[in-house]
């Protein structure tokens, strides 16, 4: 990317996985933002295993949706890792999360209320997932129904 990209200079901490969150962060990276993806120790983002197809052992989907990002593995239950994450967030303009749940984020002082108090300029966006919105669980049809999209897949109701 050139320095003329619209989001050049914007720093994003991406603590999302699966679908919507990584896609959002990918778009920010495509537009020039500096995106750091934070993954859980061990397996990382669940999408790493989605396939086939795989490219040299990595999910093609994962590789495509996580382009323009740097990645780091951090365990929020480890004090040193948590300090690293808090430092990243303190330097960021945007913090994206859909995992872990808000209660887990609150335990480590990464919940929206605490972050707003510490970093007033930080923009925190939280996606759906298990604890998002109305608590919709799942993907596909359940998520589509919760988003009001099921009407586009159904035949019109017969007129009485």
Image (tube, grey):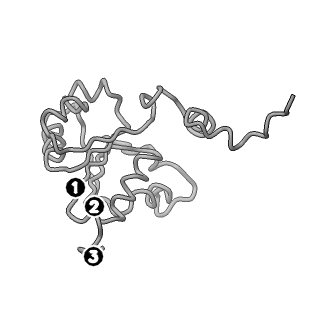
Residue 74 percent coordinates (x, y): 24, 42
**How many neighbours does mark 1 have within 10 angstroms: few (below 14), some (14-19), or many (20 or more)?**
many
Disc 1 or 3, which lies upstream in sequence?
3
Q: Image check: 96 left or right of 61? A: left
Q: Mark 2 to mark 1: distance in Å? A: 6 Å
Q: Which residue is mark 1?
A: 11
In the image, what residue occupies the spot 22% across and 29% down? 113
Res. 117 image quadrant: top left
The reply to whether the C-beta atoms of the residues labelled 2 and 1 are less than 8 Å apart is yes
Q: Mark 3 to mark 2: distance in Å? A: 11 Å
Res. 28 image quadrant: bottom left
In the image, what residue occupies the spot 23% across and 34% down? 76
Q: Mark 1 to mark 3: distance in Å? A: 16 Å
Q: Which residue is mark 2?
A: 33
Quadrant in which the C terminus appears: top right
Residue 2's disc is: 3
- At mark 2, the secondary structure is loop
53 relative to 109, above or below: below
Disc 2 or 1, which lies upstream in sequence?
1
- At mark 1, the secondary structure is strand
Between 108 and 1, the one lying in front of the other is 1
């Amino acid at each position: 990317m050139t320095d003329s990209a619209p989001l050049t200079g914007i720093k994003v901490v991406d603590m999302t996985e699966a679908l919507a969150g990584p896609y959002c962060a990918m778009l920010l990276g495509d537009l020039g933002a500096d995106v750091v993806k934070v993954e859980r120790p061990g397996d990382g983002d669940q999408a790493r295993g989605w396939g086939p197809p795989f490219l040299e052992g990595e999910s093609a989907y994962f590789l495509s949706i996580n382009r323009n990002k740097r990645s780091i593995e951090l365990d929020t239950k480890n004090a040193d890792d948590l300090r690293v994450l808090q430092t990243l967030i303190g330097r960021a303009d945007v913090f994206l999360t859909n995992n872990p749940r808000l209660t887990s984020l609150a335990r480590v002082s990464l919940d929206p209320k605490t972050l707003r108090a510490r970093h007033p300029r930080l923009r925190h966006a939280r996606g759906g997932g298990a604890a998002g919105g109305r608590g919709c669980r799942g993907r596909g049809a359940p998520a589509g129904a919760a988003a009001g999209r099921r009407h586009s897949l159904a035949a019109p109701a017969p007129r009485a």
